[in-house]
Image (cartoon, rainbow, N blue to C red):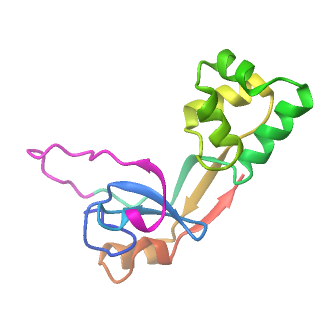
Amino acid sequence: MDVFCDICGRGEPAAMVLIEGARLAACRSCAGHGKLLHRIESKLMPTQEKQEKPMPRSIGEDEIVEDYAARVKSKREQIGLPLAVIAEKINEKESYLDHIETGKLMPTIAVARKLEKELGIKLIEKVYTEVSSSIAKSIASRDATLGEFIVQKKK
């Protein structure tokens, strides 16, 4: 089964982006329309042939919580540590953590895990994406894009 951009339905996804609260796989030309969450590496080598796989009914992914900035800043201030100390403890730049605290940058999953451990807070949650079999068939036949039918449940 070929995988296509959730926005235009044409290109191969190159990045996961956030657009109006929806996580979408976007091709290179559509990736600029949203907030970049992470880049997607092509899973296939040019010489490999694509093989059809059944569409999974539920996929669980780690995702950073929406209020990550407030959680990090609030906890850091509560325990009374300067940003420079936290940065040194988790081996990250102070300016990077400042951008995370102000919401200018979303931390990577790895940095979020370090912050969770150091500050004793929860920044990562598992998000499950469920797709019904009838919708999966519709998507596979390219009648619709995946972004039109995904239902996300946070646990």
| Residue 46 falls left or right of residue 98 | left
Q: Residue visible at 59% across and 18% down?
A: 91
| Residue 38 falls left or right of residue 58 | left
Q: Residue visible at 59% across and 46% down?
A: 106
Closer to the camera in the image, 86 or 19: 86
Up-down: is 8 above or below 87? below
The percent position of residue 41, horizontal first and vertical second, equals: 31, 44
Q: For the image shown, how many numbered marks are present on the structure?
A: 0
The percent position of residue 60, horizontal first and vertical second, equals: 56, 49
Q: Residue visible at 26% across and 47% down?
A: 42
Which of the 4 image quadrants contains residue 113? top right
Q: Residue visible at 73% across and 46% down?
A: 69
Up-down: is 61 above or below 133? above
Quadrant containing the N terminus in the rendered view = bottom left
The percent position of residue 103, horizontal first and vertical second, equals: 67, 50
- The residue lying furthest to the bottom in this view is 143
Tell me which secondary structure the magenta stretch mostly adopts: loop
Up-down: is 130 above or below 87? below
The magenta stretch is 32-52
Closer to the camera in the image, 110 or 44: 110
